[in-house]
Image (cartoon, grey):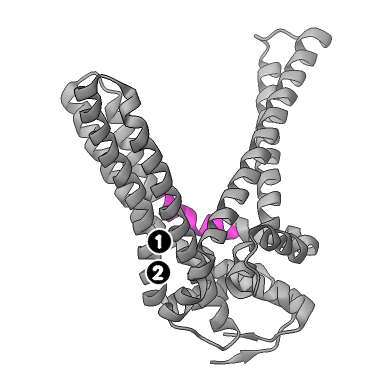
Amino acid sequence: MAKISSDPVGTLSIGNVVTTGTILYRSNLKRYLQVSLRATAWVVAIFASAVGLLFIGGVLFGITQSWLATIPLGLVWFGLALYLSAKCSTDRAVICRLAYQELIDAPETVAVATRQLLPRTWAFLRLSLLLGIYMFLIAMAGYILLILAIGLIVGVLIYVVKLSTDNGVVVFIVGLLAIGLALLFIALVIRFYASWFVAELPLAVESTRSASFSIRRSRQLSNNVIRKLVLIITVAFLITLPLSTIGAIPSWIGQFMSASTTESTKVAGGFVTIAGFFVSIAIELLVMPFWQTIKAIVYFDLRNRQEGNDLVI
């Protein structure tokens, strides 16, 4: 392995991060896909268990004619979904740890990395839940502000400036402002996401077992380079966008077919939608390790700025 002197500014450049991420991804593809397959299997198991328990619940309802009999099944599925989600979150973090260990020239096997993180399984679930709640609240707040801003602009144009809603200029201005505000909304969400982009890594490679500490640690490390992180996240998203789009196409076609008035087309649309779900799962299987590798590289560089490690690839 070649050792590269770490330049904090150079290391955390878009080209360097993406290039190093691609190198790590390709050179460890088999190991990463092994863990990604395991993580994806937990997600599939959540949906499969939901379908199975819905079927059993339907049978119970048919026998008892009471939805109360299905409540225990709902509780069982909820507990099972939490457990499977925890396993998925842990395996995603395993990929981060494997990539980070490569960067510090102390590679681990999948078995060793998994064994190191198993005691933190529930901490990874708490981390995922906390980040999910934070992002949901930020997205909702931004969405509400977006709607209020558009409503205020329309109100000013109509009731203050006295322009008609049939006026083409009004429609154009409102449309333009709506697009601008929507882009601003997306930028706001990405900006907050950038603060927590590497939140898995402290929990995966440091001695902490606290999800809240890991989030604070990510925010602390990222505080001075948010703009660069936003650019890195945006470029990584654009790189993976073609694959994600391919995965979504069958689902779009299936939904379009399901809206048909012909019964046979609706049935075919249902099968296409199901096929699209599995295609999306397969795409996620390939894309996930790339994102986790990018996180490990960014985290390494952020630590390097404070602790002076050398980047090894």
Residue 190 shown left or right of residue 24 in the figure: right
Mark 2 falls on what kind of element?
helix
Disc 2 from disc 1: Cα separation: 6 Å
Position in image of residue 41 (x %, y %): 34, 58
Q: Mark 2 points at which residue?
A: 35
Position in image of residue 36 (x %, y %): 40, 65
> Seen from this angle, which residue lies furthest left?
264
Residue 109 shown left or right of residue 179 in the figure: left
Q: Quadrant of the C terminus?
A: bottom right
Residue 217 in magenta stretch: no
The numbered mark at residue 39 is 1
Three-letter amino acid code at the position of disc 2: Val
Three-letter amino acid code at the position of disc 1: Ala
**Label 2 crowd bin: few (<14), some (14–19), many (20+), radius 10 Å:** many
Q: Nearer the viewer, residue 83 or 15?
A: 83
**In terms of image quadrants, where is residue 5?**
bottom right
Position in image of residue 90 (x %, y %): 49, 64
- Residue lying at 54% horizontally and 66% vertically, measured from the top left: 120
Magenta residues, dominant SS class: helix
Pointer 2 with pointer 1, Cβ within 8 A: yes
**Label 1 crowd bin: few (<14), some (14–19), many (20+), radius 10 Å:** many
Residue range corresponding to the magenta coloring: 235-245
Position in image of residue 83 (x %, y %): 43, 54
- Residue lying at 43% horizontally and 82% vertically, measured from the top left: 109
- Residue lying at 32% horizontally and 30% vertically, measured from the top left: 70
